[in-house]
Amino acid sequence: MEEKHYYDVNLCILKHIASGMRILDVGCGTGLLGYEMKKKGNFVCGLDTSKKELGIASKKLDYVKEIDISSDKIDLPKNVDVIVFSDVLEHLREPLSCLKNFKKYLKPNRKVIISVP
């Protein structure tokens, strides 16, 4: 069965994004949401499993990296202001473990934004 990919910008997430922040866009796809966050004056690092989609996202975002977000062996930039999980966590077997693993990249008292269908 072919995996579906969605190509739109989650406006509910975008309204919670200010400017001047370092953002991890987890499951960035082709970078549409990340690009909108970048246009607000943010540094955006996009993460995804699809090389094809990251190739497109690399033209829109500051940095992209191919990773398996369910792995506990992830090496990412530390001290980010916001981590965005837009319609990603529902695809994982252990979403809570993933969230706990990503917490170490977040600056103290910063936020994680989650959207699930």
Image (cartoon, helix red, strand yellow):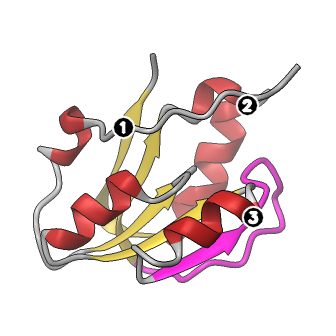
> Which quadrant holds the C terminus?
top left
For label 1, the SS is loop
Start-end of magenta stretch: 63-79
SS for dot 2: loop
Q: CA distance from mark 3 to mark 1?
A: 19 Å
Where is residue 91? Give x, y as percent.
69, 27
Please state which amino acid type lies under the numbered disc 2.
Leu
Percent x, y of residue 7: 45, 38
Q: Could you tell me which residue is drawn at 34 percent across and 68 percent down?
A: 108
CA distance for labels 3 and 2: 19 Å
Question: Dot 1: few (<14), some (14–19), or many (≥20) neighbours within 10 Å?
Answer: few
Structural distance between the alpha carbons of marks 1 and 2: 21 Å
Q: Residues within 10 Å of mark 3 (few under 14, many from 20)?
A: some
Whether residue 70 sits left or right of residue 116 in the image: it is: right
* Quadrant that contains the N terminus: top right
Q: Residue at x 59, y 58 (%)?
A: 102
| Circle 1/circle 2 CB separation < 8 Å | no
Would you name the residue on which mark 1 appears?
A: 8
- Furthest-right residue in this view: 1
Dot 3 or dot 2, earlier in sequence: 3
Predominant SS along the magenta part? loop
The mark lying in front, picked from 1 and 2, is: 1
Q: Position of residue 113 (x, y in %)?
A: 34, 43
Quadrant of residue 68 within the rendered picture: bottom right
45 or 105: nearer the viewer: 45
Q: Which residue is mark 2?
A: 92
Mark 3 vs mark 1: which is more N-terminal? Answer: 1
Image location of residue 14, percent across then percent down = 20, 47
Disc 3, SS: helix
* Residue corresponding to mark 3: 51
Q: Residues within 10 Å of mark 2 (few under 14, many from 20)?
A: few
